[in-house]
Amino acid sequence: MKAIALVTSGGDAPGMNAAIRAVTRLAYAEGFQVYGFEKGWEGLITNTFRKLTPRSVGGIIHLGGTILYTSRCDAFKTEEGLEKAAQTLAENKIASLIVIGGDGSFRGAYALSKKTDTQIIGIPATIDNDIFGTEETIGFDTAVNTAVAEIDKIRDTAVSHERIFIVEVMGRTRGFLAATIGLAVGAETILVPEVKINEAEIVRTMKENTAKGKRSGIIVAAEGVKSTNKLMKTIEKETGAEVRFSTLGYVQRGGNPTARSRLLACLFAEKAVELAALGKENSIAGIQDGRITQVKLEESCRKEKPSSPQLVALAKMLAAYYRRQPKNTLAMS
Ligand code: ADP
């Protein structure tokens, strides 16, 4: 019987378990055995795995986190670590390795692909949604919904106390999560790492909004935006408003996956097992224009997913109280 190695790596994302379940069951149907390696790349270095069966992955589709555990593994970034992992794949006669994880995990997978003949397939799972080749990743929708529910509660206090809240969401280098959350909560301002903060513009917009009767506000900031502390002080000084800072932290990564995250997990798993059955290219599964697609692993690692500035621009339009102005005179800044 041919064997598939399955691993979850990097930051956990809700829906990873749904992917583990779907890969295992579909792989069995194709005549594969499935070895679940534990703690991300570390499990491949230490050769630590358990056999997964269609029954053993029952009752997990609704659980956040990952039953295979995950880790950030520095040893995997060394030649020695990669060679040990390649040796593990050879020893266990693994035909295909399926890695469920984010862009870092895929870069690791690409580095490993240079040391092994085992086929490597990626299933995009990260709340950051920052992987080239797919419009959405497993866990993103869940994280957006979790953050929106929390920020709706923060808005109650913002409105009651007439305060501005700067709410920090995850996203060290990319603002996909912040932009989507910001739009969905009706944030007055969205700050993403890709765009430099323009304090003067933020203050001006706030003053304009106050003049129009707006007495509170939500600013959604990705964690990669470093100068939020300074911004807080500037807003207080320039507008006289009370500003509070709140970070959502790890709650964004946990919780039961939404139906959408589970569905994506099942669809990506189907593509991954189909690719394993073909046994050829190193690829990742993706979704583009509503269709499940295949993208070369190397291409996904080498290219950067383009930003979506229209989300931030649209949020700005919706937050400002423009009245009875012809469409073409709406100021975007
Ligand atoms: P995510 O997959 O969620 O983006 P990380 O960025 O932490 O998470 O990456 C997960 C792991 O992938 C790292 O801890 C490391 O073991 C491995 N990895 C990341 N980049 C590389 C690389 N260039 N070479 C080898 N391994 C890497």
Image (cartoon, rainbow, N blue to C red):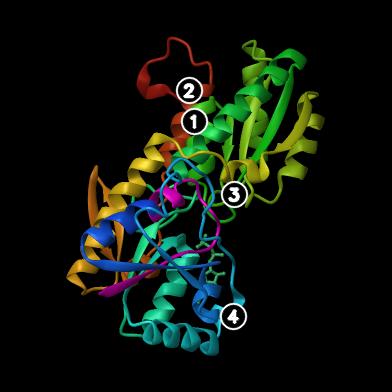
Residue holding disc 4 = 75
Q: Position of residue 288 (x, y in %)?
A: 26, 48
- Tell me the kind of residue under disc 4: Ala
| Label 4 beta carbon within 8 A of ligand 1 | yes
Identify the residue at image location x=42%, y=80%.
112
Taking the image as shown, residue 5 lies to the left or right of residue 68, namely left
The residue beneath circle 1 is: 183
Q: Position of residue 234 (x, y in %)?
A: 77, 36
Callout 3 amino acid: Lys
Q: How far apart are marks 4 and 2 (CA)?
A: 47 Å
Amino acid type at image mark 2: Leu
Q: How many neighbours does mark 1 have within 10 angstroms: few (below 14), some (14-19), or many (20 or more)?
A: many
- Assign a secondary structure to mark 2: helix
Say which label, 1 or 4, has the lower sequence index.
Answer: 4
Label 1 or label 4, whichever lies nearer to me, is 4
Residue at the disc numbered 3: 196
